[in-house]
Amino acid sequence: MKDKEFYLPYFIGVLMITAIIASWFVSVSEIALQPANFTQAATSAAVTVSASVTATISCAVSTTTTDFGTLTSASISTASPNASTSMSCANSSAGCTLSVKNNGGGGNSGLWNSVSSYLIPSPASGYPATSTLAAGTEGYGIQGATTTAGSGATLGAATRYLQTGNVVGGLLIAGTTLASSSATTSAREMIVTHKAAISTGTSGGSYTDTITYSCTAN
């Protein structure tokens, strides 16, 4: 009896220990079999790409001089030769503008006699936008007309200078639009005709004016 009493608690104790150890192994096994959980933050980077395109614009005139010869009060004179301006306008999607301005004299536009400080006004006395020249009445101005030369967008002459006959547009010292395009052009051409008239009271002498043409992107 004593042996049984002695061994029974021992046997129970062994079972308990075995159970505890077995339980520990299961727990370790379960932990070992768990998938690893690592979270990595997403990252990104941006690269900005930039570039620039410069519009290329050019103007070329066919002549640097034109001459009325001797003006008389009996007629309206046309200078010879006419001046043509060729405009090219690349990489300007809005097109380009051909502008014109003159030196005049005494602070106003016109043909200027520097010796007597006398001005034949452009286009007429009072400096309106346009005027119909008449023999015996002072006046001076230009007419503009486009041609079919060149390619690309066509030029449209400004209303002020889109005149025929003896109607002329007045020049401005500050400058104004002669013609323009709404898109790129290549060697589009504008012909300018110069006309003048004098009266019997116009001061004698030599008269000059310098007209400047320029092209800019719209």
Image (cartoon, rainbow, N blue to C red):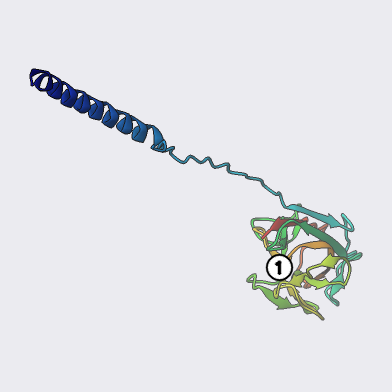
Provide the residue designation for mark 1.
Answer: 182
* 26 to the left or right of 215: left
Element on which disc 1 rests: loop
Q: Quadrant of residue 149?
A: bottom right
* 4 to the left or right of 201: left
**Mark 1 Cα shell of 10 Å, populated few (<14), some (14-19), many (≥20):** some
Question: Residue 161, percent across and down?
Answer: 74, 72
Q: Quadrant of residue 133?
A: bottom right
Q: Residue at x 21, y 27 (%)?
A: 15
Whether residue 28 is visible: yes
Q: Is residue 14 above or below residue 210?
A: above
Q: Nearer the viewer, residue 147 or 91?
A: 91
How many numbered marks have been drawn onto this rendered protein structure? 1
Q: Residue furthest front?
A: 1
Q: Is residue 158 above or below residue 39?
A: below
Question: Residue 163, percent across and down?
Answer: 77, 78
Quadrant into which the C terminus falls: bottom right
Q: Nearer the viewer, residue 180 or 208?
A: 180
Q: Amino acid at mark 1?
A: Ser
Q: Nearer the viewer, residue 39 or 12?
A: 12
Q: Quadrant of residue 78?
A: bottom right
Q: Nearer the viewer, residue 66 or 191?
A: 191
Q: Is residue 23 above or below residue 9?
A: below
Q: Is residue 41 above or below residue 89?
A: above
Question: Residue 121, percent across and down?
Answer: 70, 66
Q: Residue at x 25, y 26 (%)?
A: 18
Quadrant into which the N terminus falls: top left
Whether residue 197 is visible: no
Question: Residue 13, percent across and down?
Answer: 17, 23
Q: Residue at x 78, y 68 (%)?
A: 153
Q: Residue at x 64, y 73 (%)?
A: 128
